[in-house]
């Protein structure tokens, strides 16, 4: 690729758009319209009946089905007492940043009684993505799948499955998740953990007061048929192991990009990530039913939901099977980083003639981001103390800057060029103070605070090394970048060493993703081309870490051509005043 990205319409997104628009039937596309009525609905799980925010009364919410090249028009009406926004997770939002959805980044939230219409096109993506609320912890119940089919007449690069099934992995709280995070922020400690993991909103038979009719997800299959599971990790704060007893899975997609197919018996999927996997039902099954299981992966020093949830794979030739006491598939221990590494290392882009890996080879700007937890002094103690270690309050940061959510939309401030009092364009490109990131933490673990962004010229090629830190304990962090996919060109353990690690990069077929977990006590290197104007947040997809400030934003300026500029905001965009 060399320096080709500096030519007019030669960046990856621009070339891809030109290629796609030249495909028969894609340029026109269809406009698909949906209406989201955000209302409260009464739901019972684990013998707890409560009112939860839903879309159209559904939990999980409605499935959006589009074809690559289609336009989506989604009218949202907020009928609950909370402010709300929606994010279309993984959609690149090419020149449609006003529809991206994170509160106070690209829009002000819809207040109770307000409405907003999200308008965007799906370009250069196919597979599975998802939508969720992007305000506080409302995404605990406000989420649903996005299924992106290829254009008509374009086949999958793998055998067409008999059936496709979205399978959303989530967390259930008996308490109100909004009350959970408010209490944690008040005391400075860690939040109470969830009470169960769920499959499409159902916890299954491993929990008390569960497992009966209507509380367990069942996937009925026909012997010999192949099924595609569209897996989505919608959990608030947990990476998850996933397996189906006595069955092998073939991974064919990650974050709406095809990958070289590979077989696995156990998967690892981080919050925000999606995977399409193929499952072929046995011709002569040894049993009428098999357990589908999820359990957490974590290295946190704090508490976590250390439970295992089951769904059921049952063969349609048999009568409905009993769901209790099915033999579980073997899953790794909750802290088995080796199993996670072995699985994650197998992802490669398809890198075919039709789906090339457009990884940038030259880099204009290098960034080194130290990500992890930290602390704040104990201000406003509860009962005379704060609940983080050493009488402090938990915080999180990138390069020791804990993100402060503004009171107005950063994108609107950028469009109007009114930055004063809203943001500062001085986010550090590297930690101001170097230390042994994965060794003994420094004595001072306090973070700084600010709404600081990185400005980028249009078409800048960016490399970011994301380095985990051991402050408050080393653990993985699923980092999600809005507005872009990126190529994962390198990863490793310990402290990143540019002199040696850069030479080991994969610049041939690195996987393309929108969410990647920074390894526990390790690092990951990503590359992307800043060819989509707007303000794009990059944040940890553990919502507790996002609440503590583990995020930053890229401010990508307009390019010189008309099709490289941010359009004006829609007339119905919500106001912060």
Image: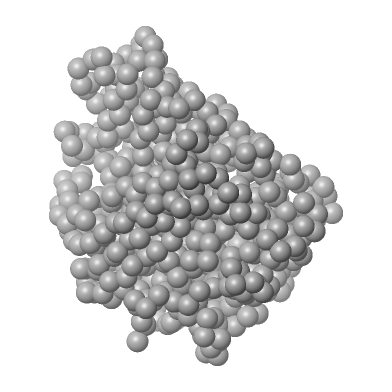
Image point (70%, 50%), residue name: 359
Q: Residue 307, how many percent across, how many down? A: 36, 41
In the foreground, 346 or 542? 346
The answer, for residue 563, to whether it is visible in the render is yes
How many numbered marks appear?
0
Q: Residue at x 66, y 36 (%)?
A: 352
**In screen coordinates, is 37 left or right of 308?**
left
Q: Nearer the viewer, residue 187 or 511?
A: 511
In the displayed structure image, the side of residue 35 where residue 192 appears, left or right: right
From what the image shows, is residue 339 above or below residue 299?
above
Residue found at the very far top of the displayed protein: 284
Q: Quadrant of residue 80?
A: bottom left
Q: Dividing the picture into quarters, in which one does residue 147 lie?
A: top left
Q: Is 520 positioned to the left or the right of 404 in the image?
A: right
Residue 72 versus residue 518: which sits nearer the camera? 72
Q: Residue at x 75, y 62 (%)?
A: 7
Q: Is residue 362 visible?
A: no
The x and y percentages for residue 303 are: 42, 53
Residue 468, position in %: x, y? 63, 57
Name the outermost residue toward the bottom.
420
| In this view, 450 is above or below 312 | below
Q: Residue 375 at what x, y percent from top left?
A: 53, 71
Residue at the image position 59 percent from the left and 68 percent from the top: 563
Q: What colour scheme was applied to this rendering of the protein?
A: one colour
């Amino acid at each position: 690729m060399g320096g080709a990205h500096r030519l007019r319409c030669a960046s990856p997104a621009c070339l891809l758009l030109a290629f796609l628009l030249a495909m028969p039937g894609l340029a026109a596309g269809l406009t698909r319209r949906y209406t989201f009525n955000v209302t409260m609905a009464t739901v019972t799980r684990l013998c707890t009946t409560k009112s939860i925010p839903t879309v159209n009364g559904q939990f999980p919410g409605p499935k959006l089905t589009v074809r690559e090249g289609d336009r989506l028009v989604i009218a949202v009406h907020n009928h609950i007492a909370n402010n709300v926004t929606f994010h279309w997770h993984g959609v690149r939002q090419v020149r449609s940043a006003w529809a991206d959805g994170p509160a106070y980044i690209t829009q002000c939230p819809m207040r109770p009684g307000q409405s907003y219409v999200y308008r965007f096109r799906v370009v250069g993506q196919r597979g599975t993505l998802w939508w969720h609320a992007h305000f506080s912890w409302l995404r605990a119940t406000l989420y649903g799948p996005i299924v992106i089919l290829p254009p008509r007449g374009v086949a999958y690069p793998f055998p067409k499955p008999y059936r496709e099934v979205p399978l959303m992995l989530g967390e259930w709280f008996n308490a109100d998740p909004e009350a959970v995070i408010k209490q944690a922020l008040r005391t400075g400690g860690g939040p109470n953990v969830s009470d169960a993991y769920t499959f499409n909103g159902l916890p299954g038979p491993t929990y008390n007061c569960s497992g009966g009719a209507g509380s367990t997800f069942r996937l009925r299959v026909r012997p010999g048929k192949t099924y595609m599971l569209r897996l989505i990790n919608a959990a608030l704060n947990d990476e998850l192991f996933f397996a189906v007893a006595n069955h092998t899975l073939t991974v064919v997609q990650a974050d709406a990009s095809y990958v070289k197919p590979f077989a696995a018996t156990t998967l690892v999927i981080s919050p925000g990530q999606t995977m399409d996997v193929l499952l072929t039902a046995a011709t002569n099954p040894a049993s009428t039913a098999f357990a589908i299981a999820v359990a957490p992966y974590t290295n946190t020093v704090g508490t976590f939901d250390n439970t295992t949830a089951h769904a059921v794979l049952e063969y349609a030739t048999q009568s409905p099977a009993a769901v209790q006491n099915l033999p579980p598939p073997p899953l790794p221990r909750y802290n088995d980083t080796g199993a996670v590494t072995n699985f994650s290392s197998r992802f490669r882009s398809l890198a075919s003639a039709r789906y090339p890996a457009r990884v940038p080879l030259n880099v204009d700007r290098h960034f080194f981001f130290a990500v992890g937890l930290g602390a704040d002094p104990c201000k406003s103690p509860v009962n005379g103390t704060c609940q983080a270690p050493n009488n402090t309050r938990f915080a999180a940061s990138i390069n020791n800057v804990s993100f402060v959510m503004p009171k107005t939309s950063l994108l609107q401030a950028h469009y109007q060029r009114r930055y004063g009092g809203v943001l500062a364009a001085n986010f550090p490109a590297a930690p101001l103070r170097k230390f042994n990131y994965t060794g003994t933490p420094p004595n001072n673990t306090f973070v700084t605070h600010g709404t600081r962004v990185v400005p980028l010229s249009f078409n800048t090629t960016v490399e970011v090394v994301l380095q985990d830190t051991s402050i408050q304990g080393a653990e993985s962090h699923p980092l999600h970048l809005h507005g872009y996919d990126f190529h994962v060109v390198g990863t490793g353990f310990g402290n990143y060493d540019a002199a040696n690690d850069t030479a080991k990069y994969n610049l041939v077929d690195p996987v393309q993703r929108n969410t990647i977990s920074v390894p526990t006590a390790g690092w990951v290197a990503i590359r992307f081309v800043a060819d989509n104007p707007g303000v794009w947040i990059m944040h940890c997809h553990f919502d507790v870490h996002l609440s503590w400030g583990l995020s930053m934003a890229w401010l990508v300026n307009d390019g010189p051509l008309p099709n490289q500029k941010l359009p004006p905001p829609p007339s119905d965009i919500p106001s912060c005043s």
